[in-house]
Amino acid sequence: MAYDSSRRLGDRLPKLLEGLALAVIVAGLAMRSTVTESPQARFSATAVSIFDQPYSLCISVCLASCGLLLIVLYRGRQVGWWAWLGLALFILGGLSGLLPASDKRAAITSLVVQTSPVIMGLGLACVSGRPLAMRLVLALGVAVGVANAIESFNQVAYLNKAMVDQYQKDPNAMLGPLGIEPNSLEAFLFEHRLLTSAGSGYLTTRNSTGLLGAISLCCLLAIWVGQRDRLGHVTKADMIYAAAAVIISVGIVLSRAKTAAFGLFAAGTILGCTIKKGRLRTACRLIYGMVVTAILIAILGFAWLGWSMPQSLLVRWQYWTATGRMIADHTVFGVGPGNFSYHYCTYKPAEAIETVADPHNLVLSLLSQYGPIGLLGWGIIVIGGIRRILVGPPVELDHVACKGRIAWPVVAFVLLGCTMFLVRPMVLAILQAGLGDEIGPDWLEATVPGLLLILVAALILTASGRAGAGSSSKDLPLILCWCLSSSIATGLVDYAPFEPANATWFWAVMGSGLAYTRRSPDRPQDSKAWSSLLATIVVVAASWLALIRPTALSSSLISQAYKAVSRADIQAASMYLDRAIKADPLCPAAASLQARLLIQQARQAQDPNRFIDAAIASIQIAIERNRADFRQHERLAEALELAGRYQQAYQAMQRAATLYPTCERLWFRLGQLAEACNRPHEAIGHYRRAIQLEQRFRAQFARLYPDWPRPVSRLGQVQYRMALERIGSLSGTVGL
């Protein structure tokens, strides 16, 4: 009897593993689409973003592990050699980027977050001949679009309006807790984003939400077209699809995402040119030719004829030119994944208003962070996948196998419900309130997205029927390629495709499309069941020990330190930060925070020297872990100045100015330190440099925002006047 039970388990294990992997992928897609995720956000003065990195790593490891399980279970035979070559090159580009990366922790996190969706997508591609699985993924994509559209409406109609009213009544009440001075650049950026805010849904930016809406719309069309091809007449399901399409479209409009609209239009026009015959192909080719001609004329005018660029294009052009100089200096390996923001400061134009964490161009982003090897690998996977979807033969559905797989969507919905109603509230509480022991999100905020996802996904899945909607449609490959191409086109002018949610959905759609392009369906290999399970366990265990545990422990200790500071228990905060520094030997955040805390104590103490040495030691640790961050050198100069070591402080500030040569504040501080070192000629030069940078900034600001009612200074009005006064005073002293 024991032998028979073991044999039955061995026979059922492949199906159980396949269903469980697909269910976890569905739950992971839902979580990533309804929880704001920004793993590369720098540690700020609040504890809101502290747990972003461990959370992103947890989701990424789950998705990658399930994808790996499916790949091993099917022996990867459903995906061509080009996919494995591209994946190997992309990972090789990321790993080689770890060598020059200044912040190793950010590089590792970014590589894992960007690679895991690719592995997940290739795993989904292996599940061929299972139309129900692919339809559930597409139905969830529709549900995600509906949920984000409703959240965007809530933000536009209520939340944003309430914040604007509160800000207009008392701006300092909102700026003060954030440490922002009135009439500063930070105050302008805060006010401008607040007054011009649109619906961003559950993602970080409105452009990201707009792109997610475009992906959801394509998922809906993929299901809808198959339903129409199969039935040929209007049904109640068409009314459901139409209602979902209207809601998603309204969400895109509320997001004001021009880049998403550009991506849909550009991709649709290019794909329309591939249609074999008809007036539509002629019209698309005509539009395509006109657009290309207009772009060439615009480039000629902007580059050589001195035309004035539109505001958004001018800002992006500055991003791109600075990134081009960065690539020229880091041609082979790039600066490393997740390290763009640190190195961008070195190349940022003086007139550019703010720094960015991405060049807003897909090609430049990959080339600058992953190098040409990573860009080549990514391109091979994407181009090969789109080509396979367009020209590959449709899969022959295994209807017998389909009938035996109806139970797993029930498991998927149960797991989805547990994830949205149990896991998501805990994650939100941790992300919003440190360790979750404080007041977290309210009941509606925690449960409404889960209800929407389950109801809409179940409704779409039921409406599409059990016969594999869309699987036999000749237009399905074109729609899925439209979705993928629109994401790529959007990536040419925006960061949105690299948002974790959008990147995950991009590869989910890619995997779904590849799963429809097999000559015959394949089944999981019984002999590979235990191997796939063992490989998954090993990957999860290794990821926990090497990736998740250090970041989670360090983030937890930093959160405890923030709470200790709020209680004015500085000794406990310092103890927590010491433990956090040791818990994650790659992350500079804890050391940087400890240095700030010690410098603050030194300013308030009668004998600051007893804190200065400890602060300098912490800063040195932070510099060793991230040598490209100018803020650490600036903080070192601040500590040395408090200790009266002006010459050393001057040298440290020079290193900071070398890393960020267009920062007025650094040159102003250099002028002050040069005066303290009795170097009047150098002080005059530094003050003049600060004035020149400030004037270049003000000139572009006036050009971009001519109707802004108040003057805005990046250096600060007081510092600007002081620099002018010191130039006059020092010039008279040295006889200039």
Image (cartoon, rainbow, N blue to C red):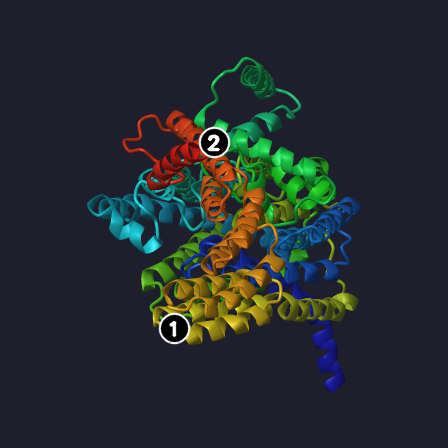
Quadrant containing the N terminus is bottom right
Percent of width and height locating residue 124: 65, 53
Residue at horizontal 28 percent and vertical 51 percent from the top: 174
Residue 553 picture quarter: bottom right
Residue 266 visible to an observer of this rendering: yes
Name the amino acid type tagged 1. Asp
Residue 489 visible to an observer of this rendering: no
Q: Which residue is mark 1?
A: 437
Residue at horizontal 44 percent and vertical 65 percent from the top: 597
Name the amino acid type tagged 2. Glu
Q: Secondary structure at mark 1?
A: loop
Mark 1 or 2, closer to the camera: 2
Percent of width and height locating residue 642: 45, 59
Q: Residue furthest left?
A: 169
In the depicted structure, whether residue 476 falls above or below residue 466: above
Q: Which residue is mark 2?
A: 351
In the depicted structure, whether residue 582 falls above or below residue 68: below
* Mark 2 Cα shell of 10 Å, populated few (<14), some (14-19), many (≥20): some
Q: Secondary structure at mark 2?
A: loop
Measure the C-alpha gap from mark 1 to mark 2. Answer: 45 Å
Q: Earlier in the sequence, mark 1 or mark 2?
A: 2
* Mark 1 Cα shell of 10 Å, populated few (<14), some (14-19), many (≥20): few
